[in-house]
Amino acid sequence: MPPAVFRRCLELIGQDPFFSAFQLSVLLTKTKEVYGMPSTFTPSVISQLGRIATQLSLEELASLRLSEIQSVLAMGAINMWTSRQLKTIFYTVLNSTRKTPSQLDSSTLVALGHIVCGIEAPVMRTLNAVEFSKAVLWLGRLRLSCSEEQLQAMIGLLSNSLSFGLVSSWGSEVFTEIGAIAAGLPDMSMSALVKEQIEGITPLAISLIPAGKFAVVFNQAQIHIFTYEQAVAVTDTQRSALSPVQETALSMVLNPWEDKPVDFRGRSLGVAVHPCPVFYLYSVLILLLLMH
């Protein structure tokens, strides 16, 4: 492909989801032939790389100039990074902008996107709680690859008195706003959630809770509160960790037409059989015909 054509097509090529790692590596080689070494890439080139950027070495990632929001936003939109790449990119952003973690504003945090999972938990705790709470509406929509420790650090920022305050005071709207990050709630806090709070947890957050934790923090009464969308989001791994009575409660939400009451003291009462309502209608019609 001639250099001029490649320049015009780079952004389109970089967004193609079907290229293999080998093909992306070949495309990166072509990018270097056209634009030079990664350290010389302009913000415009970086923002067009897309998935091609995942083939950059750690040294090449560290050499990028990521001082422009446009460049950071493009890198943060990619969800294929390894944990080492994420950490390298985050520190490249700090070096490029000459800022400390505590100085990052909400715009930069939003732009970081998936890169927030490259912030180690101790460092994450030093972020500005107010700025992070402003960015959480966008970050919470992402399927983040953060560890549970990192998510818990985020919850710590959000429960700061200058952010949303204590978890016990959060309403459903807060849980909806923080999205996926709710998966980082400590076990004790999650097990104490009431109906209004549980209803605000997004399906994405439900799916990100580790299976062992899910089975421990949600009892059958809480699972029975789930919306249909939340119940559908429960993964096979999470479901396999449930007790029979928890499984029954989940099935009741997924199959509401099955009248299957649960004794919340820990026993399933089985299926309750009731006459079909249509049966009564037919009975009345037959009676009227006979009288006629």
Image (cartoon, rainbow, N blue to C red):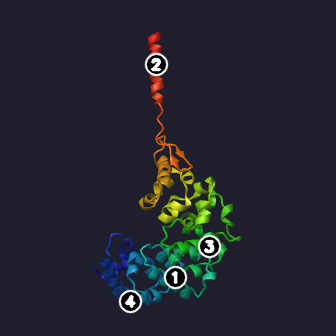
Numbered label attached to residue 267: none
Q: Nearer the viewer, residue 7 or 69?
A: 69
At numbered mark 2, what does the secondary structure look like: helix, strand or loop?
A: helix
Marks 3 and 2, how far apart in space? 65 Å
Q: Classify mark 1: helix, strand or loop.
A: helix
Residue nearer the viewer, 111 or 239: 239
Q: Which residue is mark 4?
A: 36
Q: Secondary structure at mark 4?
A: loop
* Residue closest to the far right: 161
In space, the residues marked 4 and 1 are separated at their CA atoms by 23 Å
Work out whether residue 208 can be spotted.
Answer: no
Q: Earlier in the sequence, mark 3 or mark 2?
A: 3
N-terminal-most mark, 4 or 3: 4
Q: Amino acid at mark 1?
A: Phe
Q: Which residue is mark 2?
A: 285
- Which numbered disc, 4 or 1, marks the residue closer to the eye? 1
Q: Secondary structure at mark 3?
A: helix
* Residue where numbered disc 1 is placed: 90
Q: Is residue 167 left or right of residue 208?
A: right
Determine which residue is flagged by label 3.
132
